[in-house]
Structures are given as C-alpha cells and as structure tokens.
Image: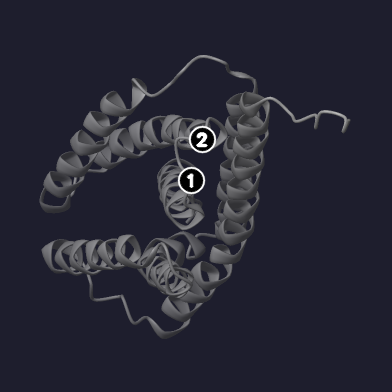
C-alpha cells in the first residue's frame, strides 16, 4: 500500500501566505517610498532655482495646489493596479516638491536656513522610525482611530484655507503644530494597516505614507522657520 500523503493544515498554509503577502507589500512600499523622495527633492530644487511657483500665493496658489493634487490622487487610484501607477505616483511627488519649494526657499533665506531644512528632515525621519517601530509592536487594532484622524485632517484643511486669507502667524503656528501631531499618528495608523494586512496595494500604501511624511516635514519646517529662523 502507498503511504498516505502528508499535507500541511490549510489554516497554516493560508497564514504563511498572508504573512508573505504582508512582507512583500511592506518591502515594495518602503522601496517606492524611498524612490519617491528623488522626484520630490528634484521638484523642490527646480522650484527654488527657477522661482516657478513664486507667484502661486493666496487663493490662486490654493486652487492650483488642490486641483492638481486631487487630480493626481484620482489618477493614482485609477492606475494603482498597473505599472503605470508607479509613474503617476512619481510625477505626483515631483509636483509636491514644486509646491514645497516656496517654503523651502523662504527658510533658506535665513542665515541658518540649511540647518533648519536638515533639522526638519531629520525630525521627520525620526518620527517615521518611531512610528514604524510602534506599528510592529502594538497588537491593538487601530482601525477605529481612522475616523478621528480623518476628522482632524478636515479641521486642518478648513483651518489652513481660512488662514490663507487671514495671514495669521499665530494661526500658522497652531496649524503646523497640530499637523505634526495628526499626521504622525496617521503615519502610525497607515503603517499598522500594512502590518495587519488591511492594505495590500503597495502603490496606495506608498501614497498614504508619502502624504504623512510630506505633511510632517512641511509643518515641521514651517514651525522651525517661524520660531528659529535667523534674519
């Protein structure tokens, strides 16, 4: 008689496959996230050296930014399951670099400007490292945090729009501080989604984390410029 064929339990195989998928999504997300920083830096450099975004101030700048940004995000959602999604995402990060260039140029105008930019970059990297570490050790389900973070982000958007017309330095200070806190938590939330298998598309995962990092860096740079910039 033939010996019975031994097989792994189905649940064990499914769990292994799920773990492998999560690791693959996380690995691809980290690689694409690192790659996305290149066009961001390039876009910021182009913007600073050419001054192409210098006149995009006030309501006009806000309209251009929101219109193009949401257009890109819509296109990314439509192409996220194909290779074209990577190209669209990288084009989006170049645009975001351009939009960041006005703030970067302003901060670089200070005597200690380069140091402030590097401090903001280092602070953002530190936040990411902490949140990435926490996402792997926290066992609690954080999905319920999403609705509160979304509400906080909406408040920030409305506050930012209002402050564009008010031009309040105090308002900018408060908005930047809150943005650092909210998007740092959003970073933890999005990373936990990947770790737990709630997000299985690495292009979409990269977009979420990129926006978190961008907002933390931008807000931290604005905060440093307002409080530590030397004329």
- Say whether residue 167 is left or right of residue 106: left
Please provide percent x and percent y for residue 47: 42, 77
Instruction: Find residue 131 and report its image quarter.
Output: top right
Across and down, in percent, residue 96 comes to 39, 65
What is the image's colouring? one colour
- In the rendered view, would you say 220 is above or below 58? above
Disc sitting over residue 197 in the figure: 2
Q: Horizontal placement of 209 versus 35: left or right?
A: left
Q: Is residue 145 left or right of residue 203?
A: left
Query: For mark 1, does the 10 Å Cα neighbourhood hold few (<14), some (14 to 19), or many (20 or more) residues?
Result: some
The residue positioned 37% from the left and 81% from the top of the image is 51
Furthest-top residue in view? 140
Q: Are marks 1 and 2 in contact (CB under 8 Å)?
A: yes
Residue sitting nearer the eye, 67 or 21 = 21
Where residue 7 sits in the image (x, y, percent)? 75, 31
Q: Which mark is residue 200?
A: 1
Task: Report whether residue 112 is seen.
Answer: no
Residue 198 image offset from top left, x and y in percent: 45, 35
Identify the residue at image location x=52%, y=72%: 39
Give how far apart the Cα atoms at labels 1 and 2 are. 6 Å
Q: Circle 1 — which element?
A: loop
Q: Is residue 195 above or below residue 112?
A: above
Quarter that holds the N terminus: top right
């Amino acid at each position: 008689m033939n010996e019975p064929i031994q097989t792994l339990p189905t649940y064990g195989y499914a769990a292994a496959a799920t773990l492998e998928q999560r690791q693959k999504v996380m690995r691809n997300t980290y690689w694409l996230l690192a790659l996305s920083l290149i066009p961001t830096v390039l876009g910021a450099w182009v913007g600073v050296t050419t001054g192409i975004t210098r006149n995009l101030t006030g309501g006009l700048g806000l309209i251009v930014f929101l219109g193009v940004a949401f257009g890109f995000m819509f296109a990314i959602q439509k192409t996220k399951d194909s290779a074209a999604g990577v190209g669209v995402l990288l084009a989006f990060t170049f645009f975001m670099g351009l939009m960041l260039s006005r703030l970067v140029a302003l901060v670089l105008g200070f005597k200690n400007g380069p140091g402030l930019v590097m401090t903001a970059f280092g602070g953002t990297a530190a936040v990411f490292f902490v949140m990435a570490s926490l996402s792997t050790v926290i066992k609690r389900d954080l999905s319920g945090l999403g609705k509160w973070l979304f509400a906080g982000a909406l408040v920030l958007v409305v506050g930012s729009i209002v402050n564009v017309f008010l031009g309040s330095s105090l308002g900018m200070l408060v908005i930047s501080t809150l943005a650092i806190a909210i998007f740092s938590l959003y970073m933890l939330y999005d990373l936990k989604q990947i770790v737990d298998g709630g997000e299985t598309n690495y292009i979409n995962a990269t977009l979420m984390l990129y926006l978190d990092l961008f907002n933390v860096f931008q807000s931290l740079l604005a905060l440093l410029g307002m409080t530590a910039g030397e004329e």
